[in-house]
Image (spheres, rainbow, N blue to C red):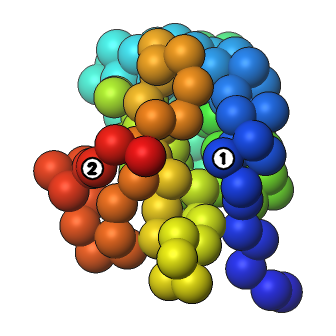
Amino acid sequence: MALKTFTVEQANACLAQLETVLAEMQEIREQLVAEAPALEAVLSHSGGNGGSKAAGEYLVRLQRFNALNQVIADLGCELKDLGLGLIDFPSYRNGTLVYLCWKRGEPSIAFWHDLDAGLAGRQPL
């Protein structure tokens, strides 16, 4: 499959959906992290005893988390840091492939960076 690239306008058009997806992913991650220690023993033995209601609910949340991550991938952008809500959009700038860079809470795409620069290399558009 060919790499999808974005203009600034196309990337900005995705932000409302990404805001919603990231908010849900962050909430689910908090639940998963909080529940994991208590469910570790149950999940490790679930193959032989059928698990538990709590373990089943945990797995449903995990599946939802993975489905939301796939929504981001299907849009063609890349989740770089869930905690920060950091998303990169492949784009061309002066004929060179770069990332448009957005962090959850920012009103629009305002930064870009080289493919290997990361967040520390963000530059204003």
Say whether disc 1 or disc 2 marks the residue closer to the N-terminus. Answer: 1
In screen coordinates, is 33 left or right of 107?
Answer: left
Kind of residue indicated by mark 1? Val
Residue 38 sits above or below residue 64 on the image: above
Residue denoted by label 2:
122
Q: Quadrant of residue 89?
A: bottom right
- Percent position of residue 42, x then y: 46, 31
Tell me the distance, in whole angstroms, between the alpha carbons under discs 1 and 2.
Answer: 15 Å
Q: Residue at x 59, y 73 (%)?
A: 92
Answer whether residue 68 is visible to the viewer in this image.
Answer: no
Q: Quadrant of the N terminus?
A: bottom right
In screen coordinates, is 8 left or right of 113?
Answer: right
Answer whether residue 69 is visible to the viewer in this image.
Answer: yes
Q: Quadrant of residue 53?
A: top right
- Percent position of residue 24, x then y: 63, 17
- Percent position of residue 118, x then y: 26, 59
Judged from the image, the secondary structure of the residue bearing numbered disc 2 is: loop
Q: Nearer the viewer, residue 17 or 41?
A: 17
Residue denoted by label 1:
8
